[in-house]
Image (cartoon, rainbow, N blue to C red):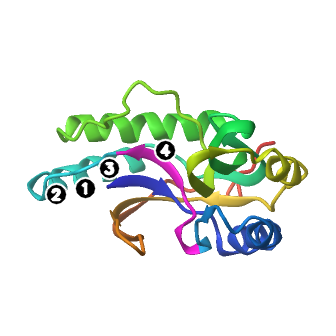
């Protein structure tokens, strides 16, 4: 399981227009489908079903403490590096301090529900995974192609608890969703 925010339909369609030609140029990569694009706030790994109700309550409490945050997709990068990448991603712009606080609250909620994230202590690096590869590969050309990308602003107004199903056709299922408080400005809440 993991906790995430999902981009708006507009943000997803804009990003798909940017990614489609890249996908066609590098079919050897395992490209994530637009339906699966998300920003992970906390990876939880295997979660005991008995712990899920308590986790859901704690996540609801965490969401209620934070305002929705204005974001947009922007640029790109790779983990660990572009010349030896295993993950190609697009980044985010907006109120990153607020997003970091939401991620820390989600992490705390998971710990208080006795579902500590296995990557606790790792620095939060918000991104949307576009593609993966089993062996390190040079994606410098793709990172360069993404460099000028800047999407339209959107409001992250909910957090989702998502179960992932692995296998030949991995997919995700949202099993819980909680609203963040409306933005202070009443609008998109985007801060560049």
Q: Mark 2 points at which residue?
A: 53
Is the residue marked by circle 4 packed among few (<14), some (14-19), or many (20+) residues within 10 Å?
A: some
The image quadrant that residue 14 belongs to is bottom right
Q: Are marks 3 and 1 in contact (CB under 8 Å)?
A: yes
Q: Residue 66 carries which label?
A: 4
Residue 94 visible somewhere in the drawing? no
**What residue occupies the far top of the structure in this picture?**
121
- Identify which residue, 16 or 183, lies in the foreground: 16
Q: Distance between the residues labelled 2 and 1?
A: 5 Å
Q: Distance between the residues labelled 4 and 1?
A: 16 Å
Q: Of callouts 3 and 4, which one flags the residue occurring earlier in the amino acid sequence? A: 3
Q: What stretch is highlighted in magenta?
A: 35-43
Residue 99 rendering spot, x and y as whole percentages? 57, 41
**What residue sits 40% from the left and 49% below the top?**
64
Q: Of callouts 4 and 1, which one flags the residue occurring earlier in the amino acid sequence? A: 1
Q: Do the residues labelled 3 and 4 touch (CB within 8 Å)?
A: no
Q: How far apart are marks 3 and 1 (CA)?
A: 5 Å
In magenta stretch: residue 160: no
Of helix, strand and loop, which one carries label 3? helix
Q: Mark 1 points at which residue?
A: 56
- Identify which residue, 138 or 118, lies in the foreground: 138
Q: Name the residue under label 3.
A: 59
């Amino acid at each position: 399981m993991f906790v995430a925010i999902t981009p708006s339909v507009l943000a997803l369609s804009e990003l798909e227009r940017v990614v489609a030609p890249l996908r066609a140029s590098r079919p050897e990569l395992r490209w994530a489908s637009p339906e699966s694009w998300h920003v992970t706030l906390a990876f939880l790994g295997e979660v005991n079903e008995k712990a899920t109700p308590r986790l859901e309550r704690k996540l609801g409490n965490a969401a209620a403490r934070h305002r929705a945050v204005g974001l947009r997709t922007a640029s790109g990068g790779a983990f660990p590096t572009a010349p030896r990448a295993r993950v190609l991603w697009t980044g985010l712009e907006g109120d990153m301090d607020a997003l970091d606080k939401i991620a820390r609250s989600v992490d705390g909620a998971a710990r208080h529900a006795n579902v500590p994230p296995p990557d606790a202590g790792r620095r939060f690096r918000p991104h949307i995974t576009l593609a993966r590869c089993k062996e390190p590969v040079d994606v410098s050309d793709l990172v360069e192609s993404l460099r000028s990308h800047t999407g339209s602003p959107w409001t992250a107004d909910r957090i989702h608890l998502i179960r992932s199903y692995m296998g030949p056709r991995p997919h995700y299922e949202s099993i819980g969703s909680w609203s963040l408080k409306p933005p202070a400005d009443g609008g998109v809440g985007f801060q560049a």
